[in-house]
Amino acid sequence: MNMLIRDVRDLDVRHAARDPMDGVTIRNEVRPGDGEAIIALHAELYPVEYGMDERFVAGVRNAVETALAKGWPEGGGAWLVERNGLFSGSVGLTDEGDGLGRIRWVLMHPRVRGLGLGRRLVGEAVERARELGMRKLELDTFSDLRVAARIYRDLGFRVRSEERTTKWGPEIVYQYYELDLEQPEG
């Protein structure tokens, strides 16, 4: 009995707890196939989690392909998340011209949710936009994405407008956010 108690006490609990970021990598380089991976992740998660139909995925495909054809991530940025070699999330920043940037494709697979990656990477995208001299950022989302909305609002984004729509299946409140980068932070 004493042997068992002593063995348990000798365990180093610092090594017993698994690092939640174990196997997670973030890269800024867009490699061949990453566009398809962004589209595939949207196609995997949004229909199941929010009931979005094929029109939603087609819209994501169009936006990703258009951005890549224009040279993205040049002039903006990419934050691509993998866990143990599996594509697990993305945040994109595109240069829309005239000092306008757009935050796009903010999505994390459940295997990396809860690690603070969405907040961290959107924050890095906002900082990158400032470094590039962008004056304003925009993003589109919908009201059911409450965790994302909290991140955007905490970073200073404000809802510019919203509309009810069924263009991708279920009725949603589609929201247009913006952030004036010329205003002082805080």
Image: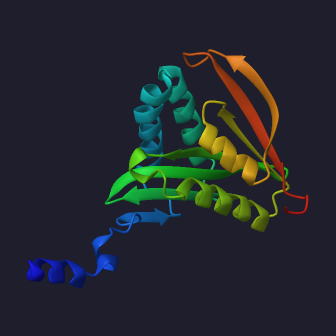
Question: For residue 177, which quarter of the picture?
Answer: top right
Q: Position of residue 1 (x, y in %)?
A: 8, 77
The vertical placement of 139 against 87, above or below, is: above
Colour mapping used in the image:
rainbow
Task: Please give left or right for residue 64 compared with residue 88 in the image.
Answer: right
Residue drawn at x 90%, y 63% is 184
Where residue 23 appears, x then y in whole percent?
A: 35, 65
Q: Residue at x 58, y 46 (%)?
A: 106
- Residue at the far front: name it: 1
**Residue 76 makes an appearance in the image:** no
Q: Quadrant of the C terminus?
A: bottom right
Number of numbered discs: 0
Residue 93 in view here:
yes
Q: Is residue 127 left or right of residue 14?
A: right
Residue 79: give x, y in percent of width and height: 55, 58
Residue 37: quarter of image: top left
The residue depicted at 49 percent of the width and 57 percent of the height is: 80
In the image, taking residue 171 as reference, residue 101 lies left or right, namely right
Task: Name the foreground residue: 35 vs 112.
Answer: 112
Residue 70 picture location, percent across and down: 63, 48
Give the answer, above or below, for where 104 lies relative to 144: below
